[in-house]
Image (tube, helix red, strand yellow):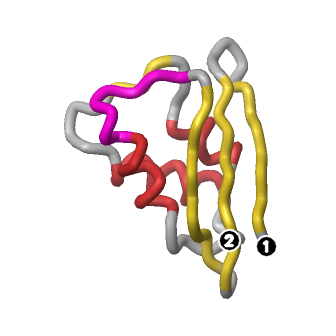
Amino acid sequence: MRTHAEYKMPGGKLVVADLAVRAGRLDAVAISGDFFLEPEAALEAINAALTGLPADADAAVLAAAVQRGLPDGAMLYGIRVEAVAVAV
């Protein structure tokens, strides 16, 4: 099953989540939107951090996974990890 969702963080930017759910787990996660990240590799780190998590994980679990997956010193402009979690 493929899923597409969008979330505009209040006072922030749009986060788009495209993903599949396979065997109850997030798969083929692709986060995008009109936000900025430094370094650029942070986006792939976010996608990797979410891939494999249970599809029924709550927003707190998803946000924590994204935070742990970010490279040291990564900067998110216009969004927070919680906004990514809401979109997912």
Q: What stretch is highlighted in magenta?
A: 35-42
Task: Choose between 34 and 53: the one closer to the eye.
Answer: 34
Q: Nearer the viewer, residue 11 or 40?
A: 40
Q: Mark 2 packing: few (<14 Cα in 10 Å), some, or many (20+)?
A: some
The location of residue 49, given as percent across then percent down, is 42, 59
Q: What residue appears at the point 57 percent right and 65 percent down from the top-left corner?
A: 28
Crowd rating for badge 1 (residues with CA inside 10 Å; few <14, some 14–19, many 20+): few
Q: Name the residue under label 2.
A: 55
Element class at badge 1:
loop
Relative to 85, is 11 above or below?
A: above
Q: Check contact, mark 2 vs mark 1: CB within 8 A.
A: no
In the rendered image, residue 51, in percent from the top left (x then y), is placed at 50, 66
Q: Residue furthest top?
A: 11
For the residue marked with disc 2, what is the amino acid?
Ala
38 inside magenta stretch? yes
Residue at 70% over, 44% down: 87
Residue 42: percent from left, percent from top? 35, 40
Disc marking residue 62: none
Q: Which residue is under mark 1? A: 1
Q: Is mark 2 on a helix, strand or loop?
A: loop
